[in-house]
Image (cartoon, helix red, strand yellow):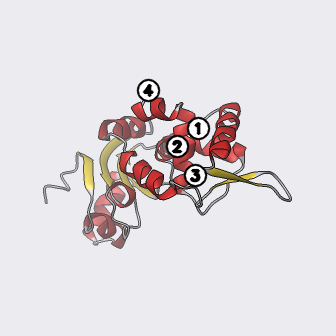
Amino acid sequence: MDPLSKLFGSPARLKLLRLFLFNDDMAFTSADAAFRTRTAKEAARKELVVLVASGIVRKKAGKGPVMYQADRKFGHYDALKVFMRTTTDLSDSYIVSTLKRAGSMRLIALSGLFTGALESKVDLLIVGDKVEEKPLALAIRTLEAELGRELRFASFSTEQFRYRLGVYDRLLRDVFDFPNRTIVDKLGVTQK
């Protein structure tokens, strides 16, 4: 169990906090929050009651379902958001093992959200062989649930990637010209 999960009471509460703090301009139903954080609906509902009672999240009632959103008026909002940002990190091995379920990974490069390069259009660049779409989508959702944010990602076969690299593709330049971190490189891209 993540030490922060112990500090904040449960993994579900920690994931919900990240979801609301990192997406403070959005409102979610309890079902949507549960889906995005990959927690059980009942656990999400229970934790939302605690977060609303603490003042970190506010309930928005109106026509339609009840929505929840981060309350920017919470006394320690900015400090909590900074704390969550600086402590939210996934290990390289966790990212690799999660993505390997989708196929054979040849290159995984992190940019954008992972490096603080806000100019980058991609957070995660994946190159692999026999990468299946559904398992990849599931792996990305798993990473998003841990991070509390949606990831912008691009996935290519080795052949597509080599072609794009050869024609100086703008998307690839957006990754490699800005701060990035390569955690798997079986293509020798970082050696060039």
Quadrant (top left, top right, bottom left, bottom right) of the C terminus: bottom left
- Gap in Å between the C-alphas at discs 2 and 3? 12 Å
Q: How far apart are marks 4 and 3 (CA)?
A: 21 Å
- Residue under the point 35% across and 54% down: 114
Q: How far apart are marks 3 and 1 (CA)?
A: 14 Å
Q: How crowded is mark 4: few (under 14 residues within 10 Å), some or many (20 or more)?
A: few
Residue most toward the top? 1
N-term-proximal mark, 2 vs 1? 1
- Which numbered disc flags the more N-terminal residue, 2 or 4? 4
Residue at x-position 60% and y-position 63%: 25
Marks 2 and 1 sit apart, C-alpha to C-alpha, by 6 Å
Residue 126 at x, y percent in the picture: 37, 51
Mark drawn on residue 20: 3
Q: Are marks 2 and 1 in contact (CB under 8 Å)?
A: yes
- In the drawing, what numbered circle is on residue 1? 4
Is label 4 in a helix, a strand or a loop? loop
Among the 4 quarters of the image, the one containing residue 75: bottom right
Amino acid, disc 1: Arg
User: Given contact means CB atoms under 8 Å apart, are the residues at marks 4 and 1 in contact?
Assistant: no
State the residue position of label 2: 145
> Residue 38's mark?
1
What residue is at 54 percent from the left and 45 percent from the top? Answer: 17
Q: Earlier in the sequence, mark 2 or mark 3?
A: 3
Q: Is 72 on the left or on the right of 31, as rendered?
A: left
